[in-house]
Amino acid sequence: MTKVVLFRQRQVWMPTISGWLLLLLIGIVTSILMANNLYAFLAQNQPVGARVLVVEGWLAPEELDQAIAAFNKEKYERIVTTGGPVSGWPGINRDTDYAKLAADYLAHHGIQSDLIAAVPAPRSAQERTFLSAVMFRESAQRLGIALDAVDIFSSGPHARRTRLLYQMALGQKVRVGILAARPDDFDPEAWWRTSAGVEQMLFQSFGFVWVKCCFWPGPPGSKQELWAVN
């Protein structure tokens, strides 16, 4: 009769006290390096010299001011605002969208109204940035915009995810650049010192990883891509 063996003795190597201390030191150094470089990674600044600047309409006024400065400095020919319906703002019409609000703000702060185009997006419970990018793509021909290159203006650590989603929506033939507004509610060089910085960085880090590994919108024009469009 064959004897059944369920357990077997093995020799296991474990770190000594010195080994544990070395591993702890390596972990601390790695964490510090990651913390110091995480903001620069997420808040990507890499414009491609496009003629059109797309501005995410949900940005705060201080960030829209930075978008205006970038528009004037780089001498873009057109500026397009994006965004879906506004919710949770008392006194604002329910039919108002972030694209229109941002366009009005830009027009009242030095940008010629004929250079501004608002491209609203429908209400959506998921990946609103991607849906805004799809609406921009679908409106480009109507607006007379050649989709060869575009620069996007986003908010700090949201920028890298924005660029990724726009690239997914516009396709690999379109050069997508990105500009990140500098936040005023926390110090990018020491974001871990404030609750606002930690909250933003953790949320945006998770969002970027989720898009990278789990977001599959479907082919252009498909029902899977245009889930929120009537």
Image (spheres, rainbow, N blue to C red):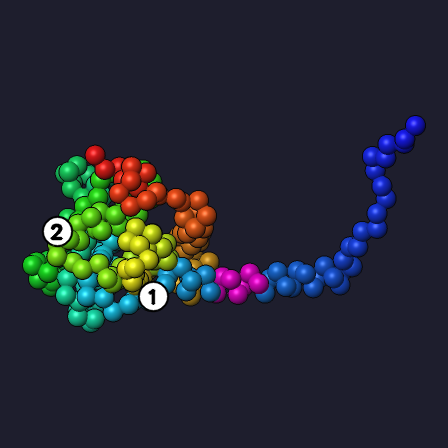
Question: Badge 1, how many Cα within 10 Å: few under 14, some, many 20+?
Answer: some
Q: What residue did someone put label 1 on?
A: 45
Residue drawn where x is 21% and y is 34% of the image: 230
Determine if residue 203 is in view: no
Among the 4 quarters of the image, the one containing residue 26 = bottom right
Residue 128, image x, y percentages: 29, 44
Residue 147, image x, y percentages: 22, 58
Residue drawn where x is 66% and y is 60% of the image: 24
Residue drawn where x is 15% and y is 62% of the image: 78
Residue 40 inside the magenta-drawn segment: no
Q: Amino acid at mark 1?
A: Asn
Q: Amino acid at mark 2?
A: Arg
- The span picked out in magenta is 30-36
Among the 4 quarters of the image, the one containing residue 111 = bottom left
Q: What residue did someone put label 2 on?
A: 142
Determine if residue 2 is in view: yes
